[in-house]
Image (spheres, rainbow, N blue to C red):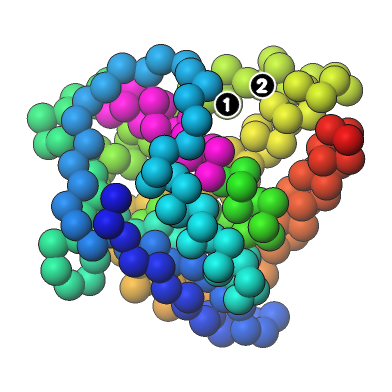
């Protein structure tokens, strides 16, 4: 997967903050696929993104913004235009499993907020539907004090509070929305760091 990694400096009411921005440099069209739960290892693309997150965390980034469209050139990420709404949800579900591994890896690095921008209506529908389906699937597993329940609770909290999919353009998000909202979101980010720390301690 061809992507660029940049660090964006954001002026917020609480001071300067850094965000990792990931932008496609090539055209990536995802064909419809069914959702099948699996424990496949990270893909090369996932490892590439996580390595970019590691470098960004070293520069104090706490937010990751995934762009679906590059400002110039052919950089694009989206579903095949013939994909139906139902196929979009199933396709997003099949992708979300791998994405969650990346989110967890970035969380361990200190990056806790994940925003996807510039998406088309089909992709927003698919990923938001996938998040809702995943929440319904893991919510019953998140009760109790077992290690598995703590892992499910961490994923559940991330999905509900720190992972977002927008059709909103990157420029508007970065200039007018994120600087004002980031200070409020940092309270949620601190909560997820505590949950991750508790899980790591419980895992030994």
Look at 54% across and 38% down and name the residue there: 100
Res. 176 image quadrant:
bottom left
Residue on which the image places disc 1 = 135
Per the rendered image, the range of residues in magenta is 88-102
Q: Is residue 92 magenta?
A: yes
Q: Nearer the viewer, residue 158 or 56?
A: 56
Image position, residue 92 (x, y; %): 36, 31
Residue 153 vs residue 14, the one in the foreground: 153
Q: Is residue 25 above or below residue 179?
A: above
Q: x%, y% of residue 150? A: 79, 29
- Considering the whole magenta stretch, tell me its main secondary structure: helix
Q: Residue at x 47, y 16 (%)?
A: 37
Q: Position of residue 121 (x, y in %)?
A: 25, 43
Residue 200: which quarter of the image? top right
Q: Residues under labels 2 and 1: Cα distance?
A: 6 Å
Check disc 2 and report its element: helix, strand or loop.
Answer: helix
Q: Residue furthest left?
A: 82
Q: Residue at x 55, y 38 (%)?
A: 101
- Label 2 packing within 10 angstroms: few (<14), some (14-19), many (20+): some
Residue that badge 2 annotates: 139
Q: Residues within 10 Å of mark 1 (few under 14, many from 20)?
A: some
Is 98 one of the magenta-colored residues?
A: yes
Q: Which residue is drawn at the image coordinates 31% and 17% (left, top)? A: 34
Discs 2, 1 touching: Cβ within 8 Å: yes
């Amino acid at each position: 997967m061809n992507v660029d990694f940049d660090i964006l400096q954001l002026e917020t009411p609480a001071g300067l903050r850094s965000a990792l921005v990931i932008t496609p440099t090539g055209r990536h069209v995802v064909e419809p696929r069914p959702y099948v739960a699996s424990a496949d290892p990270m893909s090369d693309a996932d490892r590439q993104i996580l390595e970019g997150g590691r470098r960004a965390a070293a520069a104090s980034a706490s937010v990751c913004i995934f762009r679906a469209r590059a400002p110039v050139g052919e950089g694009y990420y989206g579903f095949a235009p013939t994909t139906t709404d139902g196929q979009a949800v199933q396709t997003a579900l099949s992708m979300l499993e791998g994405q969650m591994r990346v989110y967890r890896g970035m969380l361990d690095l200190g990056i806790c907020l994940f925003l996807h921008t510039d998406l088309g209506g089909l992709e927003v529908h698919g990923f938001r539907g996938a998040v809702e389906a995943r929440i319904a699937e893991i919510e019953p597993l998140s009760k109790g004090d077992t290690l598995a329940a703590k892992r499910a609770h961490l994923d559940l909290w991330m999905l509900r509070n720190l992972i977002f999919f927008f059709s909103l353009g990157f420029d508007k998000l970065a200039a007018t929305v994120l600087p004002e909202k980031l200070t409020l979101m940092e309270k949620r980010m601190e909560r997820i760091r505590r949950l991750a720390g508790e899980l790591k301690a419980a895992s030994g």
